[in-house]
Amino acid sequence: MSKKIDYINELSLFSYNAELNREKGIIQQSGYMQASFSFVVMATLYAGELFLSYKHPNISYNLIFFSFTLIILVQILSLVFSMLAQYRYKTEYLYGPREIQAEINQRLSDTANATGAADEMTVNNLYIATLDAVYKSLYEVNTKRVRWLLYAQYSMLLAIVLMVVLFFLILLTKMI
């Protein structure tokens, strides 16, 4: 029985640590998205300046201006999504030392009153229940973060695609 308890405890702790590492990775990737945001916005503004100075009878100034405004708005949306991925949502937390002691004493007391004996299984069940609650809370928050991060990536990709399409549109009209 003790080997089984040790195995359960080890796997529970492994799952919890894996979710903590997942959280760190998501937040780090969101930071990378924010860094790439600054690079892409600078490139967009530079390209916008060049394209707006380009005069061609087949392409209106307003179309180019509207296109770059749309591209910048999509990029800003990407920044907002990546910031939401880094937001510190409220999660369950592990008990502090005094809370752990009080909870264990309470459970042991309840078990001893009900069965006439307190056992190690009661303490282990508290350990598993606590880790499970914290793990589930962290998993839900990380799932939200992943969704925000995907939105940030999709919107940045959309902005880049729009910029490339606009570039080829201008290039095509220059050839005509």
Image: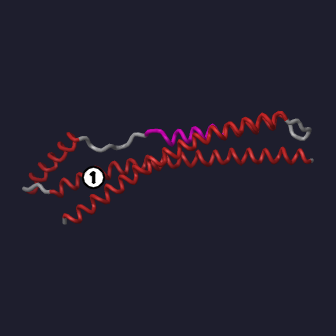
Let me know if residue 124 is in the magenta part. no
Image vertical order of residue 132 relative to residue 94, above or below: below
Q: Amino acid at mark 1?
A: Ala
Q: Position of residue 143 (x, y in %)?
A: 47, 50
Question: In which quarter of the view is residue 167 placed?
Answer: top right
Q: Please report the residue visible at 53 percent of the width from the left and 44 percent of the height from the top.
A: 30
Left or right: residue 33 compared with residue 68: left
Question: Quadrant of residue 72 in the image?
Answer: top right
- Considering depth in this image, is 53 or 150 the residue closer to the camera? 53
Q: Quadrant of the N terminus?
A: bottom left
Q: Nearer the viewer, residue 102 or 55?
A: 55
Left or right? Give the position of 93 relative to 174.
Answer: left
Side of 168 relative to 116 (left or right): right
Residue at the disc numbered 1: 129
Q: Is residue 80 magenta?
A: yes
- Foreground of the two, 131 or 172: 172
Chain part drawn in magenta: 74-88
Residue lying at the far left in this picture: please name it. 116
* Residue name at image x 40 percent, y 52 percent: 19
Count of number-bearing discs: 1
For disc 1, the neighbor class at 10 Å (few under 14, some 14 to 19, many from 20) is: few
**Residue 125 on image: x %, y %:** 23, 55
Instruction: Identify the element where label 1 is drawn.
Output: helix
Model colouring: secondary structure
Point out residue 100 in the picture as x, y percentages from the top left corner. Answer: 21, 44
Residue displayed at 85% across by 46% down: 171
